[in-house]
Amino acid sequence: MAGAGLRADESLRRYASFRIGGPADLLLIPPSVEAISLAFSTAVQLGIPVTRLGGGTNLLISDAGVRGLVVRLGRAFDYREWGESQSDEPAKAGKVTVRTGAASSLGRFVSEAVELGWGGIEFAAGIPGTVGGGALMNAGAFGGELSSTIIGAEGVTMTGDVVRLDRSQLDFSYRRLELDVDVMITSVSFSLRRASVERLKGVVESVQAKRKRKQPSGYPNAGSIFKNPSGNYAGKLIEQAGLRGTVVGNARISPDHGNFIVNLGGAKAADVRALMHLVQEGVWQKCGIWLEPEVKLVGEWNEASAVPS
Ligand SMILES: Cc1cc2nc3c(=O)[nH]c(=O)nc-3n(C[C@H](O)[C@H](O)[C@H](O)COP(=O)(O)OP(=O)(O)OC[C@H]3O[C@@H](n4cnc5c(N)ncnc54)[C@H](O)[C@@H]3O)c2cc1C
């Protein structure tokens, strides 16, 4: 399997959309489910911590990097298996099940579904990252969330057991999937419904246009930094606190959208983290709301508040 393998002291910057982050002691790009299982069971025996990466589009990786083993799925987990359209069963008329490798690009999966006339995930056009990361984050936009179409997943537990999870075991909430045991998701199954290709393409065009209008482009970033508090928008609160455009080091709160922090070039994770603290304090002082990070902090941090992924 080209690209698969184990690399020592590998810089993680290129694996993160922020283009920020120190090295992993060990980075594994596994060629198979069996290889993940062996790696996880060995890591448990040796007491080596394990960190899971997807497409790296929702991560802030620390400048010190990540100790232990980092696992990122590669080409072996980029596939789609389309089931038969189940139109002979009245309750399932016009539906299809598709099993998707967790490393598949979410964007490519959406495009493929739209071309084939299968609807339900078109709202996700333009969300970067992988299907596995999207499931773990319950990625969503413009009123849709992946959880509305996910019917199951497969994965490997941190002790190396291969598991199949049905929908009742997947506890989704806003930008979150809670599982009884931690797993590296290896595939996700979706149920999609028949829809007109033209209508689906119309939705994709409209969500892409909204993205273009609302999201800053040109500098590396990790999308929304904070979750929207119930009934409010993090971006609006950050603007109200007068923080748009604030710069620390080489990172800046976007002047166009308060909930985006951009890497102006050579930014450190510490610069972004300092801006995140400024935002949390500033919004708290001004609006009495404590913003919760949406972006996941990965690696070693010299602070009590950092939450490892
Ligand atoms: C420009 C831009 C726009 C964005 N717009 C949106 C948006 O509209 N809506 C939205 O919801 N998000 C958005 N995001 C954030 C991000 O794209 C999503 O959260 C995405 O689903 C993350 O997927 P990923 O593969 O990059 O995961 P990563 O960022 O690599 O990981 C995210 C989390 O999932 C875990 N994880 C990843 N893969 C696996 C796996 N296979 N098994 C177990 N755990 C795993 C990681 O450990 C981490 O905790 C945007 C980001 C950018 C840069």
Image (cartoon, helix red, strand yellow):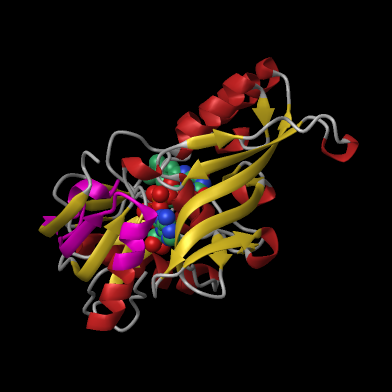
Q: Is residue 12 magenta?
A: yes
Stretch of the chain drawn in magenta = 10-38
**How many marks are shown on the rendered structure?**
0
Look at the image and tell me whether residue 25 can be seen.
Answer: yes
Q: Quadrant of the C terminus?
A: bottom left
Measured from the top left, where is residue 178 in percent x and y? 56, 69
- Residue extending farthest to the left is 9
Q: Quadrant of the N terminus?
A: top left
- Up-down relation of residue 303 to residue 111 (above or below): below
Measured from the top left, where is residue 93 in percent x and y? 83, 32
Compare residues 254 and 268 and report the one nearer the observer.
268
Measured from the top left, where is residue 284 in percent x and y? 48, 73
Compare residues 296 and 26 and report the one nearer the observer.
26
Measured from the top left, where is residue 131 in percent x and y? 48, 46
Look at the image and tell me whether residue 260 can be seen.
Answer: no
Q: Is residue 37 magenta?
A: yes
250 relative to 157 in the view: left or right: left
Q: Quadrant of residue 59?
A: bottom left
257 relative to 89 in the view: left or right: left
174 relative to 298 in the view: left or right: right
Residue at point 46%, 73% (across, down): 285
Residue at point 31%, 84% (across, down): 304
29 relative to 216 in the view: left or right: left
Residue at point 17%, 58% (across, down): 268
